[in-house]
Image (cartoon, grey):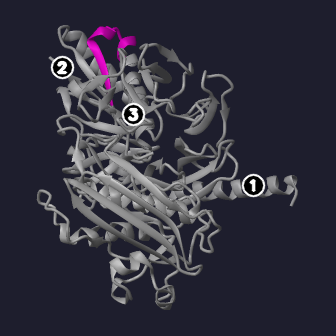
Amino acid sequence: MNLGEKMTIKTNLKNILLLIFTTLILSACSTAKKSADIEGDVYTGKETVEYLATGVADRVFFATNKSSLTSASRATLRKQATYLRKNKSLNVTIEGHADERGTREYNLALGERRANAARDYLMTYGISGKRISVISYGKEKPVNPKSSPISWSQNRRSVTVKVN
Amino acid sequence: MKLLNFIFLISIFFLNKSHALIEIDITRGNLDPLPIAVSPLHVDIKSEKYKDLKIKNLGDDISEIIERNFKNTGLFNPLKKDAFVQKPDIAHLKPRFEDWRLIKAQALVTGKLIIKDEKLKVEFRLWDLTAAKEMTALAFTTTPSNWRRVAHIISDKIYERLTGEDGYFDTRIIYVAESGPKNQRIKKLAIMDQDGFNTKYLTLGNELVLTPRFNPTNQMVTYMSYFRNMPRVYLLDIETGTQDIVGNFPGMTFAPRFSPDGKKIIMSFAKDGNSDIYTMNLESRLVERITDHSSIDTSPSFSPDGKFIAFNSDRSGLQQIYVMRSDGSNVKRITFGKGIYGTPVWSPRGDLIAFTKMYKGRFYIGVMRTDGTGERLLTENYYQEAPSWSPNGRVLVFYRETKAGEKGEGFSAKLWSIDITGYNERKLSTKTDASDPSWSSLLSK
């Protein structure tokens, strides 16, 4: 088989896969609106979430292997920034976590990157970096011990914790 | 703990260099293991009492350790003792070769021991039954409490004689002992003999500890600890128990390993969310930055000649394995297969890199050449990672985790080993759950 043939087969496969995906998504939308606690691999539910103050969630969630903030995460962090601006003497630690489906050392680095993504966002909203320390726990401290996609999505998180 | 210098070879009184008829090819999976008879060592009746050691059983105990070592290699088939045809002391003098051949043995190990003046003296012989001659004979004198190590050293000598390669029985494994529920794990550094005996805990479990690794002389261990909630790389002297933080980094340091000469520690340092690779010279305290990239660079591992470093980076988007010169120049990606790759570890022979591969939700341990070609996946499972090489580069030890239920039930972490041929996968016996294994080099080399 030459390369050209391979390519056409690949594109054909891609088209078929695309078709299957679209069908799946469409059927998912029509049948089960409730499986929406997870969106594009990022947890969107309220289970496991704690609060720094009324309406100020302490954590944001991430997609697999990613440390980018979703718009929901940014909204949560803006609330945290407002809260921190009102409580000027308060310092926090941001804990970065990964799910259990990765190698330990890479997950330590990934947790660090997630915690810093949250920290950087708080800083762009005027919170001094001196008030925010970070610590990565990698996959060492899962909030949900179950081995399932939902619990992994709950474990891919950064959590803002008051230190004083 | 006195690790070294307590076993001395008294004499190598006879070594037959003539070509042996029996030999084992360990370069491929051995589906036809060599039948070997390990006679109990004869215990001299003039042996003196030593502490609470059960001298009468010592000959049987040593031969059983040797048998278990051999069986675990998958290369040998130790024969049942009830079929043995000669008394240990007589066989040790001169076996009746044709009788041993009748029970289908091809090699025979005999020996005798005596405890006198608080010293244990052991001698053993390896016989080629087909050629009807002695292949190796050795004698050791040591403190009686080291009797298990004597059994491992004898195992190594026989393995070396029959395979032509170094053994790996007189070795230790350092690992993280785990206990408690999955979301509140207690982790301690633990060290044990390669066969699971003599487990000792090196930390108390008050803080999280991860990824211990031996230095080349097995006296020091570098590991990561969350002592005082500051995740940093530490150095532990096994003999004295002293622990020191490595360097003065203003952030997390992790993924440590020694350089092959033992003088440096290579590790990742995370700054403002970005992890790069650094070395620190343990004598001069000089810190060198090796990588400078906005991606995650971690899990560094030196080649045995110290000239290259394999590491893990997501600079291409996802985790892949890269190799560079030890000064950080000439970075080359070596993994291009399907899936993502982590935990590269350079073989002590220098020819292969062991790795963890993740593909479609499954985890693989594999080996490839140092340029990334010749990838071979040895084992597939739900979750496994962190291979570490046996000192002869023939076996990998790694850890494997199981799926957990609603409350974390059903979860376990265990050490496993597999030959690089892909054969002989087996679970190691550990007192507790275990992860992050690191294999020592030969203790008596």
Dots 2 and 1 on the same chain: yes
Residue type pointed to by label 1: Lys
Asked whether A134 falls inside the magenta stretch, the response is yes
Say how many tags the image has: 3
Say which residue label 1 marks.
A10
Residue in the image at 54% along x and 21% along y: B294
Asked whether B377 falls inside the magenta stretch, the response is no
Left or right: B14, with B249 as reference point: right
Local secondary structure at mark 3: helix
Query: Which of marks 1 and 2 precedes in the sequence?
Result: 1
Please report, as a chain letter, where disc 1 is located. A
Residue type pointed to by label 3: Leu
Q: Residues within 10 Å of mark 1 (few under 14, many from 20)?
A: few
Mark yes or no: residue B167 visible. yes
Label 1 and label 3: CA atoms lie apart by 36 Å
Say which residue label 2 marks.
A163
Dots 1 and 3 on the same chain: yes
Quarter that holds the N terminus of chain A: bottom right
Residue B109 versus residue B90: which sits nearer the camera?
Answer: B90
Depth-wise, is mark 2 or mark 1 nearer the camera?
2
Please report, as a chain letter, where disc 3 is located. A
Q: Which mark is residue B95?
A: none
Dots 3 and 2 on the same chain: yes
Depth-wise, is mark 3 or mark 2 nearer the camera?
3
For residue A57, above or below residue A28: above
Residue B250: image quadrant is: top left
Local secondary structure at mark 2: loop
Mark yes or no: residue B414 visible. no
Residue B22: image quadrant is: bottom right
* Residue B302, x across and y down, in percent: 55, 33
Please report, as a chain letter, where disc 2 is located. A
Say which residue label 3 marks.
A108
